[in-house]
Image (cartoon, grey):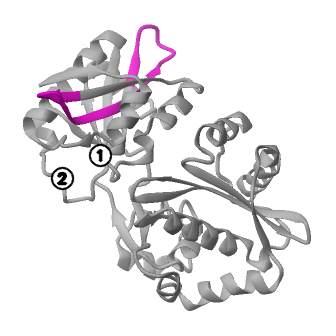
Amino acid sequence: MEIREVEAGTWMAFLEGHPEAHVLQTAPWGDLKTGFGWRVRRLLLVEHGEPRAGLQVLIRPLPLRFFSILYVPKGPVGEWQHPEIFRSLIAALDRLAQETGAIWLRIEPDAVDGELQLDLKAFGFRPASPIQPRRTILIPLQDEEGAILQAMHPKTRYNIRLAERKGVQVREARREDLPLFYRLLQQTAARDRFAIHTFDYYRAAYERFVPHMARLWLAFYEEEPVAALMAFAWGERAWYFYGASGDLHREKMPTYALQWTAIRWAKARGCRWYDLWGIPDEDPEVLEAQFTSRRDGLWGVYRFKRGFGGRVVRWAGAFDRVYIPWLYRLIQRLGLL
């Protein structure tokens, strides 16, 4: 087995054979992050001339001179759960850690909780706080549109139709519409009290992903932009990453019209699942018991998302491999992990 460092084109050719891969492992995602403080490296394990597994690793230089962190979001990809393959990949990451002064390596496998075939603790990893949402809702797209609608909560179906009856129009956004999208995003962030990226970040995401792997839609009421949604797709899945709504005409239910547009887009391009990307990390019984009374954190969006049907999924979480223990512990005590 041989580990090769590869460029974006070779990496994407490998991913073409892995429709189950996560969009966060695609080259455009790595390239996006390079514009905002990260570096990216792509490692491919080849055996007898055939690629068997690989990963895209993000490198974050720290203000502390000579130090960094390594992060593998939703990877590795391929046959990485074979012990010998995983051991080879980790050895390559260990060498990269030494080269970059990494304090720790964090991986977040794209695997459902309880379905990891490897015991990562046996490879020197410890459980860590995930960066990506631990729990989500996956909507199956294999059935016809009518069946997908029928699997939704009746109130959600009603709201989708209400938006149409009230005259909400959904249009695919162009690059010049990005300021409208960002203005709606700012209103949403101020109202719901969450942080957003800079305008340049969303513009870079649009430029790297649209139209091949993403779409941005705007909803209008009487020619006034009232809501927006940006969804991404790779292989078998699509992901709802960014949503926004203004303070006016929310009773016209434009966010429901947008979500149905994105679901139909994902189905039309052959995706098998639509990932609503982030709900509270609680068991389904707790979610159903508390969603009417809770508004903190991701509870505020769970009531909206649950109406679209699907099943609740919990991911395996994050794991750290620590290279400089004393500095890792110090950063933990400072609350920076």
In contact (CB < 8 Å): disc 2 and disc 1:
yes
Left or right: 183 in relation to 30: right
Amino acid type indicated by mark 2 = Leu
Tag 2: Cα neighbours inside 10 Å, few (<14), some, or many (≥20)? some
Given residues 328 and 183, the one toward you in this image is 183
In this picture, is 261 found above or below 333?
below
**Position of residue 40 in the picture relative to residue 243 (left or right):** left
Dominant SS type (magenta): strand
Q: State the residue position of label 1.
A: 109
Q: Nearer the viewer, residue 35 or 9?
A: 9
Residue 294 seen in render: no
Give the quadrant of residue 96.
Answer: top left
The residue tagged 2 is 116
* Quadrant placement of the N terminus: top left
Rendered location of residue 52, percent (x, y): 19, 37
Label 1 CA crowd tier, 10 Å (few <14, some 14–19, many 20+)? many
Is residue 308 at all visible to an observer of this figure? yes
* Quarter-of-image position of residue 37: top right
As measured in the structure, the alpha-carbon distance from the residue carrying label 2 to the one carrying label 1 is: 9 Å
Instruction: Find residue 97 and report its horizontal and vertical position in percent.
Output: 30, 17
Residue 138 within the segment the image draws in magenta = no
Rendered view: 22 above or below 330: below
Q: Secondary structure at mark 1?
A: loop
- Numbered range of the magenta stretch: 45-69
Mark 2 vs 1, N-terminal side: 1
Residue at the image point whose x is 44% and y is 46% from the top? 23
Mark count: 2
Q: Quadrant of residue 122?
A: top left
Residue 60 counted in the magenta span:
yes
Q: Secondary structure at mark 2?
A: loop
